[in-house]
Amino acid sequence: SFPIPSGPSSSNLTTIMGPADNQRFTIRPTSGNSYLIAVRDRTNIAFRNFVVDATAYVGTLNSAIGVGVTNSVFENCELIGRTGAARTASAISVGPGASNITVRNCSIHGWRSDTPNPGAHGFYWHGSNGLIENNEIYDNNGFGLQFYSVPGGGVDNNIFRNNYVHDNGGGPTGGDMGGLYIATGSGNKAYNNLFVNNNYGIWVTSAGNNNHLWNNTIYNNTTYGIQITGGSGSIRNNI
């Protein structure tokens, strides 16, 4: 591990990056901490042009990336999970109180957990004011993305747009899971996404309010395309 200094401002980030998208640096651990990249006490950090390959990792792994601060960017990345993992929560975990986190142009796939449901998610998101865009999220046996609040922070005002979410869900024992789960939070928006071949396409529950689903394309999902079991908001122009 090595310390990374905070950037001077949200427009002037400390950046760790490969020289180009086709020359990305790779992190390929076989053991270690519960987070492979942990951004906990630094702000204004960007990671660009990188790969995290966890296929050979042995032991408990919470997430490839854990974020607990503000103003972090993860861009042009690939996060590769592992099959038969004893315990994995997600590829990316954004903690309560974290805000202004951006994940853009990433491929997130193969994250699986053999522990009881819900399996491993692409994103396990507890933060607010985040932006998740232009990603491909697939072959995870939990949800592609789960918005879920825990003590210490609300899951509010996040944007999930222009993502391709496919072949997620099933869980280690054939449970629900699927593409997008808005379990809690307010003011979250999901639009212009493509949900294909998941168990659930989109699931919104009663603990979430004022959440919005617009202009999404949802097809060939096993259980439901869109399931709403409560809450408030708007649903329009979805196919």
Image (cartoon, rainbow, N blue to C red):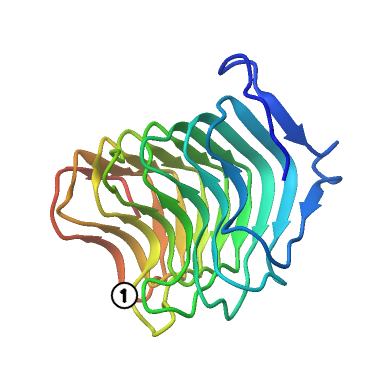
Kindly give the residue lying farthest to the bottom in the view shown.
Answer: 173
Under tag 1, what secondary structure? Answer: loop
Q: Residue at x 50, y 72 (%)?
A: 87
Query: What residue is at 38 percent from the left and 72 percent from the top?
Result: 199
Q: Which quarter of the rendered picture does the C terminus lie within?
A: bottom left
Tell me if mark 1 has few (under 14), some (14-19) or many (20+) residues whose alpha carbon lies within 10 angstroms of its own. Answer: some
Q: Position of residue 170 (x, y in %)?
A: 41, 77
Residue 64, quarter of the rendered image? bottom right
Specify whether 168 is left or right of 29: left
How many marks overall? Answer: 1
For residue 5, what is the image quadrant? top right
Q: Amino acid at mark 1?
A: Thr
Rendered view: 21 above or below 78: above
111 to the left or right of 157: right
Residue at point 38% right, 79% down?
116
How far across and down, in percent of the image, does residue 154 sit? 28, 38
Q: Position of residue 15 (x, y in %)?
A: 71, 29
Task: Locate residue 33 relative to residue 207 in the image: left or right.
Answer: right
Q: Looking at the picture, does residue 156 appear above or below residue 203?
A: above
- Residue in the image at 73% along x and 62% along y: 29
Q: Residue 53 location in percent, x, y?
A: 71, 61
Decide which of 85, 79 is in the foreground and name it: 85
36 lies above or below 84:
above
Residue at mark 1: 223
